[in-house]
Amino acid sequence: MNEKFDRIVSVGMFEHVGKKFYKTYFNRVSQMLKKDGVALIHTIGSNLPPRDPQPWITKYIFPGGYTPSLSEITRPIEDSGLIATDIEILRMHYAHTLRNWKERFLSKKDQVLEMFDEKFLRMWEFYLTSCEMAFKWGDQVVFQLQLTKDIRSVPNTRDYIY
């Protein structure tokens, strides 16, 4: 694509980009964003320093997935020419989402077992429960990054969002 956009929104994708592609990703966002455009990157992240991904989730759920620390993504953002105009860290929100997903999943247990086996059911329940606890008691958070090329592209406060 060679188009330029006023707005770019990425939700639930950045966790699957991979560390070695952060520079490419943010360079591409920068290339596709108009001079006064705004990008919102919504991603699961870690509030701890960089570390290896969780081995069980990598093996069974998201091969190649990675939840970055903030320090791992700020340099590629800066190097791409983008400016972080706002960073919001949502701490507990996703724990509630995961709990609700798990409850809905288990409420359809009979239907799940018609399509998949008991091992799949237990693995998915374990995944949803362990991730809920990682958000509730561990290091997992959601980062919402507002990025621009021109610091004047957005108001100084979040009031315009609401």
Image (tube, rainbow, N blue to C red):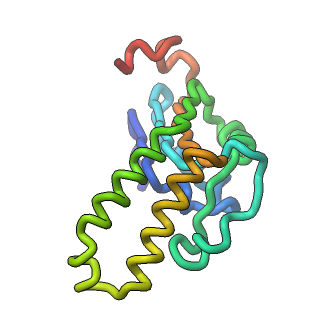
Is 31 situated left or right of 48 in this image? left
Whole-percent x, y for residue 5 in the image: 39, 39
Residue found 73% across the figure and 47% down from its top = 72
Q: In which quarter of the image is the N terminus?
A: bottom left
* Marker count (numbered): 0
Compared with residue 155, is residue 95 higher up or lower down, i.e. above or below? below
Residue found 47% across the figure and 47% down from its top = 95
Compared with residue 62, is residue 101 higher up or lower down, i.e. above or below? above
Front residue of 62/106: it is 106
Q: Quadrant of the C terminus?
A: top left
Compared with residue 57, is residue 79 higher up or lower down, i.e. above or below? above
Residue found 55% across the figure and 49% down from its top = 44
Residue 159 falls in which quadrant of the image? top left
Front residue of 29/71: it is 71
Front residue of 133/160: it is 133
Whole-percent x, y for residue 97 in the image: 39, 48
Residue found 44% across the figure and 47% down from its top = 10
Whole-percent x, y for residue 146 in the image: 52, 31
